[in-house]
Structure formats: structure tokens, C-alpha cells
Amino acid sequence: MSLRPTLLEQIGSDVVQFQDASAEFDTTVGKVLALGRADLACLAQLHFGGPTPLSAVTRDADVARLELAGYVQREAASGGHRLVLTAHAREWIDTLWGPLQADGHQLMAGLPEEHLRIIAGFLRAARAIQDRHAARVARLLQAPGKSRAARQRGGLSPAALRRVQLYVEAHLAEPIRVGELARRSGLSVFHFTRAFRQSTGMTPHTWVQQRRVEKARELLGDASLPLGDIALAVGFSSQSHFTTVFRKLTGLTPAVIRRDRR
């Protein structure tokens, strides 16, 4: 049996979790520096691109605030002014991002050059796809207000629902809290619960239980796995709890399902 579907699903889940971890890191860095995401993007732009004409700096960044905080300064240049990082900013960049960058370089150092070429090519292609779809989504903002409001009303956005689903699939063996699912959707627990039910027709708890039971049905095909091990593998605290929920959702016990498959 091909592992391709499983690998693709795992890659999708890993990408989402990597994005979440990256966003969480940037949020924490922003708190340390007392800066917003647009301001951090401006620092990154100056760090990697060097001195930059003021007109080319990220629009949403508050340049005046960055200057007052001592992170950037203006320099006279032909045709106007350019923005540069201060020594103070570079010290913070070395402190906050330096160790992360070093670990990344160490991770890549062990890969053959051919693998690095494949990764580089994949990332370029993925970025092109992302840019194309970012432009497509941005065009929705230009749609008439009435039709846009109709899309926004009710349940979760497809992207938010997918983030929640991928998180659940990757953590079925662990406790899954509604608060964590809400955080991944960008909503409060109250609004997430209502929106999730609007999108799926069930509460988050019921949906998670269904996914646990569906995964358990797959594992029941392996006769060598004890029922207790299956219960733990899909996130139930005990075999009895597993059996109770399984019977409630399927009308049969796990033992009966396994016996009928023989």
C-alpha cells in the first residue's frame, strides 16, 4: 500500500504546525521589543536587504515609532533618505534571532548539496503558489460589501476549519482542549464553538470524539493491537471509556467490530 497519502497529510500537518510555531515566536519577539508584526517585518527587511529607501519600506510599519525606540535611523541618500538599522537593533537581532538561525544552519549542514537544491526549488515553487493565491484572496476585498459579508457570516472560514482539523488529526492521542482549537481559528472559545457548529453541524467535542472513533476503526483491523492500546492511541483515558464512546457513536462495541472482521 502506498504511503503517499499519509505522507502528504503529515506534511500538511507539519507545515501548519511550523507556521503556528513561527507565528508564536514572532509574537513573543514582538512583545520583547514592544513591536507589532509589521514593524518586525520592517526590521527583517532592513536586516536582510541592508539600507533601504524610505519609500520602499513596509508600508504598515510605524517608522517614526521605530526611530523613537532606537531601532532605525534615517540617512541622507541620493534622491531622498534611506532607513538603516541601528547598532541597538542589531544587538537585539543577534540575541533573539541569532540562535534560531544558527540551529537552522546546523540542521541544513548535514544535508547533501543535491537535497538542498531540491528543497530550494520546492520552496521557490511553493512561494510562487502562495503569492498567486494571496493575490486571489486579496481580490475578495474588492468584491461588493454585501457579497463579502455573506461569505463572512456564519461558520469558520475554510482556512480556519482546515487548521483546526489538521491540529486534531496530529494530536488524537493527546488531550485536545477547545481553547487550543479556538486559538488556532483566531476566535474566542465562545465564538469558535458557535462557528464550528455552524460549519460542521456538531460541537467541537463531538467532532473530536468522532475522529477518535474513526481512527480506532482503522486500528481495529490490526488484530495484534490490544483494545487498551488502541484506546490510548486515539486519546481515551481507559478502555472502558473508549468502549462507551465507541458504542454511543457506532451502536457496536470495538470487540464486536473486530470479531466481525475476522
Image (cartoon, rainbow, N blue to C red):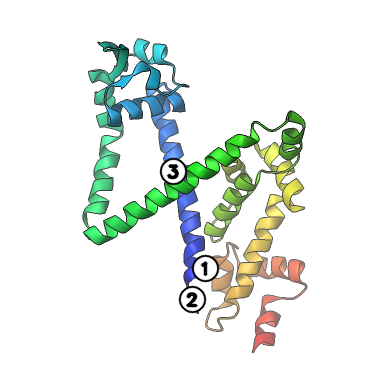
Taking the view exactly as shown, the residue that stands out farthest to the front is: 79
The residue to which callout 3 is attached is: 21
Q: CA distance from mark 2 to mark 1?
A: 7 Å
Q: Which residue is mark 1?
A: 5
Q: Residue at x 68, y 43 (%)?
A: 156
Q: Residue at x 78, y 73 (%)?
A: 251
Which mark lies nearer to you, 2 or 3?
Answer: 2
Say what amino acid the circle numbered 3 marks.
Ala
Which residue lies at the image location 27% right of the left edge and 56% below the top edge? 116
Work out how far the residue at label 1 is from the one at label 3, CA to CA, in angstroms: 24 Å
Query: Which labelled disc corresponds to residue 93?
Result: none
Closer mark to the observer between disc 1 and disc 3: 1
Q: Amino acid at mark 2?
A: Ser
Give the percent coordinates (x, y) of residue 162: 60, 51
Q: Answer yes or no: do the residues labelled 1 and 3 have beta carbons within 8 Å? A: no
Q: CA distance from mark 2 to mark 3?
A: 30 Å
**Residue depicted at 61% across the width and 68% down the height:** 215
Quarter holding residue 153: top right
Query: Is label 2 in contact with label 1 (beta carbons under 8 Å)?
Result: yes
**Callout 1: SS:** helix
10 Å crowding of disc 3: few (<14), some (14-19), many (20+): few
Residue 2 numbered tag? 2
Residue 175 seen in render? no
Between 98 and 247, which is closer to the camera in this rendering?
98
